[in-house]
Image: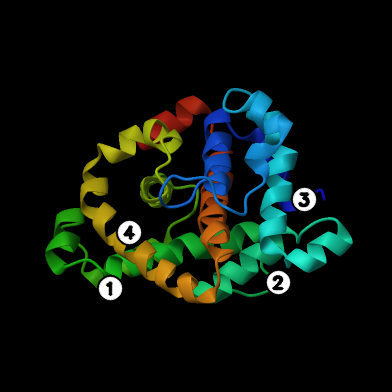
């Protein structure tokens, strides 16, 4: 099923598409998910990891099927649209959004929600190390006001994706986001982000196994949409 909210994937780099494919295929231990079907498809076998654009339709179908009910998927021949998946994930995490908001705006709120959760996990010393001028509450307020195209927003979102990639033993993101991993902000923010993601995982352990796919995929897609508008040179400058 074509998904208008995921058409932008065609504008993403091969590295980012590999990252999304790995998120769909591998679990937290680096093993192939028991319920995934992507890696068994010939288009994946023949094109992973060097020619990922031709795998996009299969990746979209896989994500949609994870978002839908297995029985209903069989009857209708496909899963549910990404927008429905995004709203499910956002509601479960506790993101405050209007159902009339654009997909991109809900994704922005989702990432900001994780930023704020991460700051809540920081000590005051961490906050001072990250910013000499802000208190914890002021820092959260500043984060909420960030424009998604701003370098700091992109860097923070990159830290979240990098921590996810470590959780899922995905090597694809480690090289792509190596500059972030070496940055001062990562050293301070990485731990709190990991704690925030662990808290989210605790929620979804209860909610059901499908969310263990949908949550990291939704976060990854939200990041991919934000960076897809930049050229490689522009992104290198932002991440540097």
Whether pointer 4 and pointer 3 mark residues with C-beta atoms closer than 8 Å, the reply is: no
Quick one: label 4 or label 2, which is nearer the N terminus?
Answer: 2
C-alpha distance separating marks 4 and 2: 29 Å
Whether pointer 1 and pointer 2 mark residues with C-beta atoms closer than 8 Å, the reply is: no
At 52% from the left edge and 39% from the top edge, which residue is drawn?
19
Q: Is disc 4 surrounded by few (<14), some (14 to 19) or many (20+) residues within 10 Å?
A: many
C-alpha distance separating marks 4 and 3: 30 Å
Front disc: 1 or 3 = 3
Residue named by callout 3:
4
Q: Residue furthest front?
A: 34
Q: Residue furthest left?
A: 125
Q: Report the disc number at residue 137.
A: 1
Quick one: label 4 or label 3, which is nearer the N terminus?
Answer: 3
Rendered image quadrant of residue 229: top right
At 56% from the left edge and 70% from the top edge, which residue is drawn?
90
Q: Report the disc number at residue 100.
A: 2
Q: Is disc 1 surrounded by few (<14), some (14 to 19) or many (20+) residues within 10 Å?
A: few
At 69% from the left edge and 34% from the top edge, which residue is drawn?
55
Question: Is 223 rendered above or below residue 181?
Answer: below
Quick one: label 1 or label 2, which is nearer the N terminus?
Answer: 2
For the C terminus, the quadrant is top left
Q: Secondary structure at mark 3?
A: helix
C-alpha distance separating marks 1 and 3: 37 Å
Question: Is 94 rendered above or below residue 147?
Answer: below
- Across the whole image, how many numbered discs are drawn on residues? 4
The foreground one among 162 and 27 is: 27
Q: Position of residue 195 (x, y in %)?
A: 30, 64
Front disc: 4 or 1 = 4
Quick one: label 1 or label 3, which is nearer the N terminus?
Answer: 3
Residue 102 visible in the current orientation: no
C-alpha distance separating marks 2 and 3: 16 Å
The foreground one among 181 and 22 is: 22
């Amino acid at each position: 099923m074509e998904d208008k909210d995921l058409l932008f994937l065609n504008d993403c780099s091969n590295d980012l598409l590999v990252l999304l494919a790995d998120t769909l295929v591998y679990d937290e231990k680096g093993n192939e998910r028991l319920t995934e079907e992507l890696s068994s498809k010939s288009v994946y076998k023949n094109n992973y990891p060097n020619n990922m654009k031709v795998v996009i339709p299969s990746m979209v179908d896989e994500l949609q099927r994870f978002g839908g009910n297995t029985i209903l998927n069989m009857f209708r021949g496909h899963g549910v649209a990404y927008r429905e998946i995004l709203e499910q994930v956002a509601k479960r995490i506790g993101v405050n959004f209007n159902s009339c908001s654009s997909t991109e705006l809900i994704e922005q709120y989702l990432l900001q929600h994780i930023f704020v959760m991460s700051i809540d996990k920081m000590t005051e010393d961490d906050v001072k190390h990250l910013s000499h001028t802000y208190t914890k509450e002021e820092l959260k307020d500043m984060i909420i006001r960030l424009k998604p195209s701003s370098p700091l927003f992109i860097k923070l979102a990159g830290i979240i994706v990098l921590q996810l990639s470590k959780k899922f033993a995905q090597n694809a993101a480690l090289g792509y986001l190596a500059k972030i991993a070496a940055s001062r902000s990562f050293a301070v923010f990485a731990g709190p982000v990991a704690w925030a993601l662990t808290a989210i995982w605790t929620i979804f352990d209860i909610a059901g196994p499908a969310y263990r796919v949908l949550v990291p995929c939704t976060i990854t897609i939200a990041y991919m949409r934000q960076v897809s508008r930049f050229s490689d040179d522009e992104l290198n400058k932002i991440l540097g």
